[in-house]
Image (tube, coloured by chain):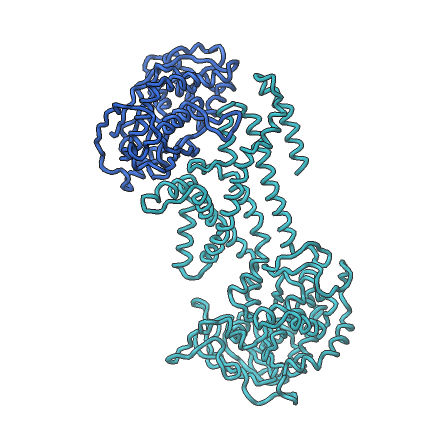
Amino acid sequence: MSRLKGLLSALSSLGLAAALLLHATPASAEAKCEPDKVATKYPTLAGKTLKIGQDGESPPYSFRDPKDFKNLLGLDADLARETFGCAGIKIEFVTGGWSGLLPAVIAGQTDMMWDTLYYTPKRAEQVDFVTYLTAATGALVAKGNPKAITSLDDVCGKRATAGLGTVEEATFRDLSKKCEKDGKKEISLVTYPDMPGGTRLIASDRADVMTTDLNMVNSFIKSNPTTFDRGFMIISDYKIAVGYTKGNKDLGQAVLDGLTVLKESGKMKEIFEKYNVDYTLALPNEILTK
Amino acid sequence: MPQAIAAFLVFTASIAPALAADDPPLSPWREFLSYIVEPFLLEGALLALQISVLAMIGGITLGLGLGLMRLSRHAAISGSAWLYIWFVRGTPQLLQLVFLYDALPPLGIKLDTFTTAVLGFALNEAAFSAEIIRGGIMSVNRNQSLAATSLGMGPFLTLRRIILPQAMRAILPGMSNDVIGMIKGTSVASVIFVNELTFRSQQIVGQNFKFFTVFAAAGVIYLIMTSAVAACQALLERQFNIEIDREAGRGSGFKLFNLPLRGSGPKSAAPGALAPVPVAKDNAEAAASLDWIRNIANPTSAELGIEPMPFVVFRNVHKAYGSREVLRGIDLAVNKGEVVVIMGPSGSGKSTLLRLVNHLESLDWGEITVEGKYVGYQRRHNVMKPTRDLAKARADAQIGMVFQHFNLFEHLSAIENVMEAPVQVYGEKPETARSLALKLLASVGLSQHANKLPHRLSGGQQQRVAIARALAISPRLMLFDEPTSALDPELVGEVLGVMRRLAEAGMTMIVVTHEVRFAQEVADRVVFMDEGLVVEQGTPAEVLGTPKHERTQRFLRMVEREADPA
C-alpha cells in the first residue's frame, strides 16, 4: 500500500528503525504447550496482555462472527488464539483499518499485526516476522467466467481491478505494457479502496476480473456461489507472516513455539480446513529479522 | 424529516429484495430492520457520537481562541493563528490522526485510541470553527462594540454579552455542518483502531456481503443522529433569532449569552401592538420625571446654570488617520453645565473630536482632560501613554455617548439595553438597575416599549432608548454625535425634545449636529469647525446670526437650503 509506504518511511526517518538485530533462532527443540511456564519461558511477557492488530473485514483470515459480531473469527484469529493459549499469555484483538495496523506495531501502540501481512525485507527494517503461510493470488470473476479468463495472459484488453497500492495493482500495470508490446489491447485498470468494494465491481459487471489473496477469493466464492467464480490462481513466492515489535525476542519465540506445536498436534491443519485454506500452502515457521 | 425517513424506508424496501435475491430464505426487509437495532452497530454509533461531542466542545473552545487571535491587531498573534489554521486545514485529517497515534509514542507521548481520536478531531475542528466564529464576529456591525466600549465595557465583556450572542446566527449553520461532518467523518479514524459505525458495518459486510441491507441500516442510524443535530440547530437558531418577537416568543433563553427568559419582566402592550405612542403623551410622561433627570445631570449643585469652571479641556489636540490629518490643533474648553454645539461640514473632524473625549480613539498629540483628569492616559516624560485597563478608565470617567445610528444592542430589549452597563460594568443589582431603567425609559417617554427589541421601534424611539442607555451610567458629561442625522424629519423633534430637557436639567453636553434651530434655542455656545480646526465660536446669536468667517456663512447657507421644505 503506497500510503503505508509513506508512513513507514516517515516513521523510520524519525529514528524508529534501530540497527538491525541478527538473531538466528532455531525452532524450539521441545515444543509443547506449557501455559504455566510462561514466567520461565517468556519472562518479559508474563502477566501482560498482548495487543494484536486485525482488520476484522477480510475473510477467511479475520472477520466478524456472524452469530455474535463481538467475536473475531478466521484463520489468523484462530491461530493467534491457539498460539497464545499455548504460551499462557493473554491477548486482546484490536481492530482497525488494515493500513493502520503495521504503523501501530512500529509505534508501539500494539504488539503485533497478525492479518495477512506479507514479509518483505523493507518491512523487516521496522518489525520482525514469523512466517506461516505461502501467499497465493486468485482471480475473482463473475459466475460462469463469461470472459473466459483462465490465466494472466487472458486479461489483456479486459477490465481489471486490484486494491490500491497492492502487489496485484503493480502486476496489472506491468502486464498491460506487455500486452501492448505483444500487439494486444491494453488493460483497463481500476483500483478499489477496500475488498468488499472490489467484489462489488465484479458483481455489478463494472470489471471483468479482480485479483487478490487466493483464500479471500475462495471465501468470496463460497459465500456467494451464484455470483462469483474463480478464473485462475497463481502461487506466489511471498511469505505471509506475523509482524511484531522489532527486537522482542520473547514474543517471536512464543509465536514460533506456538505455531510449531499447532503444526505437530494437527491443530493447525484443523484450523486451515475449518476456513477452507489449502493446508499445502502452510510454510515452515521461521523468524525473519531482516 | 420523518417523511424523508419514511420515503427512504419505502425505497429500501422496494429495492432490497431484488438485490439480495441470492438469499431467498431471509427477508431483506427484516434483515435491514435487525441491523438498525444491532447492538454492534449501535455501539459504533455511540462511539462516533461520543468522539464528536467531546471533540466539538474542545474544537469550539480552541476555535474561539484562534478566531479571536486571527482578529488581533498584533501580527505575531494573528499570524500564528493563521499558520495553525493553514496547516491543520491544509493537511488530511487521516494523516493528522496517524501522526498523533503512531508518531508521538517514540517521543514518549503514548495516547490511547479514544483520546487520540478526540484530540485529533478537536485540533482539526478548531481550525475550521475558528474561521466560522471569526466570520460570525465580523458579521456583527462594528457599531455594536463601539457602543459597548462607550459604556465602559471591556473587550471580553463586550464579546460575551454583545458580540457573540449576535454572531450566533451566522455561526450556527456552519457549526452544525461541522458537527454532522464530524459524526460521519469519525470513520477515517479506523486506521487508529476506532471501531465506529462505518468501520463496523464494513466488517459485517466483509463477512456476509449483505452490503445493501447493512449499509442502508448504517445510513438510517446516521440519519437519526444527524437529524438530532439538525433539530438542535433549528432550536438554537430560534433561540438566537432576534426577529422572533420576544413577547410572543416562547422557550427559555440562554443566560450565558445574555438572552434572559422570554416573557419575563413586566409585560407591555399586547404582542403586535406596534402603533407608536403619541409624542404628546410621551412628553407628558416625561415632564413628570424631569426632576429625576435633573438629579442625574447635576447631583451636587442645587442651583442650575453654568459654572465658570472648565470641565472638559482640549489642548492642542492632533489626530491623523494614516497621512490624513483630521484634527490639526484643537483648543477648546467646555464648562460644567454648558451645552456646546459643534457644527461644520462633514470631514471637519467633529465626530473624531467627540470620540477622543471618552478615548474611543487615541490622541496623536496634545491632551484632553475631563474634570481635570485624563481618560485612560498617563503622562510620562511629556508623552501621553494609554493606561493598561482602558475599559475601567472609560467606566470611571462616566461619559455618556449617543451615536448617529443609535447603536442599540440589537438582541436586547429596550430595558435590557439600558440595564446592561449598570449591571455588567458598575455591578448594580439587576432589580435596582431595572427600576432605574424603567424611570429612565419613562423620562424619555418610552415606558410602553420597555420590552421591545430595537428593530420593533421607530428611529426616534431607538434614539431615545440610546439616550436613556447613556444616562443609565449617571454620566457627568454627554456626547451626542449627530443624534438626529439618521432620522426621518418627523422623528427629529422627539429626540431633540429629550435633549432639550436634558440641557434644561443642567447636563454638560457636547453636541455635534446640523440642527440650527436646536443650536439657537438650546446651545450656550456654538463652535464651528472646518478642516480639523476651530474656525469660530461664540453664542448662538453670534455664530449663527452674524457669522464672521466666510466658511461658516457658506455652511449655514447650505444647511438652511437643505432644511427648506421646498
Whether residue B504 sits left or right of residue A144 in the image: it is right
**Residue B539 percent location from the top left of the image:** 61, 85
Whether A257 is drawn above or below B404: the answer is above
Q: Is residue A94 visible?
A: yes
Compare residues B217 and B60 and report the one nearer the observer: B217
**Residue B302 percent location from the top left of the image:** 65, 89
Seen from this angle, which residue lies furthest front?
A: A36
Which part of the image, by quadrant, shows the N terminus of chain A? top left
**Residue A158 percent location from the top left of the image:** 42, 16
Whether B369 is drawn above or below B411: the answer is below
Whether residue B227 sits left or right of residue A13 in the image: it is right
Identify the residue at horizontal 48%, vertical 50% (top origin): B59
Compare residues B522 and B23 and report the one nearer the observer: B23
Which part of the image, by quadrant, shows the C terminus of chain A? top left
Q: Is residue B348 visible?
A: no
User: Which of the 4 image quadrants contains residue B395?
Assistant: bottom right
Q: Colour of chain A?
A: blue
User: Which of the 4 image quadrants contains residue B146?
Assistant: bottom right
Chain in cyan, by letter, is B
- Total numbered badges shown on the rendered structure: 0
**Residue B224 percent location from the top left of the image:** 61, 38
Identify the residue at horizontal 57%, vertical 36% (top origin): B222
Compare residues A172 and B541 and report the one nearer the observer: A172
Whether B3 is drawn above or below B272: the answer is above
Identify the residue at horizontal 33%, vertical 12% (top origin): A182
